[in-house]
Image: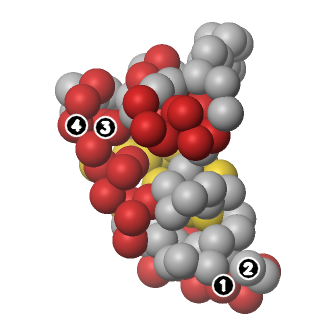
Amino acid sequence: MTTIKLIAHQGHVACVNDFPALDQYDTIIIGHPIWWGIPPRLIANAIDQLPLDGKTLATFATSGGSGYQRSQSYIQRVVDQTHHQVTIIPGTVLSNQRQTKQWLTKANLI
C-alpha cells in the first residue's frame, strides 16, 4: 500500500508485536520522521500495541520542515482512540544534540 493510499484511508500498517517489555519504564520515548505532515502509520500501530497505560509518552521527529503541531495532534488522536491512560509530553522536531538536550531538559526527562 502506498503512503498516499494510507493517508486517504487513515490506514495502519502491519507491525510485528516484538517490542521489549516496558514494565520497568515509566516514560516511553518514540522518535519518528514526519511524512506528509504526520508520523508514519507504523507509529500509530506501535502505539496501539504498546502497553502504555499509566505511562508517560514523549515523541519527537527526526526530520520535518513543517513543524510538529500536526504530528502532536495525530499522536494525541491515536492515544485517544486506543483509550490508553497516558500522560503525553509535547514533542518537537530535533535536528541536533543541543536541541535534543534542551527538549529532554524542558520535559524533565534528564
Q: Which quarter of the rendered picture does the N terminus lie within?
A: top right
User: In the image, what residue occupies the spot 51% across and 63% down?
Assistant: 37
Helix, strand or loop for disc 1: helix
The residues tagged by marks 3 and 1 sit, at their Cα atoms, a distance apart of 25 Å
Identify the amino acid type marked 1.
Answer: Gln
Residue 41 horizontal/vertical position (percent): 55, 36
Q: Is there a contact, CB below 8 Å, between mark 3 and mark 4? A: yes
Residue behind mark 2: 95
Q: Is there a contact, CB below 8 Å, between mark 1 and mark 2? A: yes
Residue behind mark 1: 99
User: In the image, what residue occupies the spot 59% across and 84% down?
Assistant: 102
Residue behind mark 4: 80
- Closer to the chain start, of discs 3 and 1, is 3
Residue 23 horizontal/vertical position (percent): 50, 22
Identify the amino acid type marked 3.
Answer: Val
User: In the image, what residue occupies the spot 66% across and 84% down?
Assistant: 99
Residue behind mark 3: 79
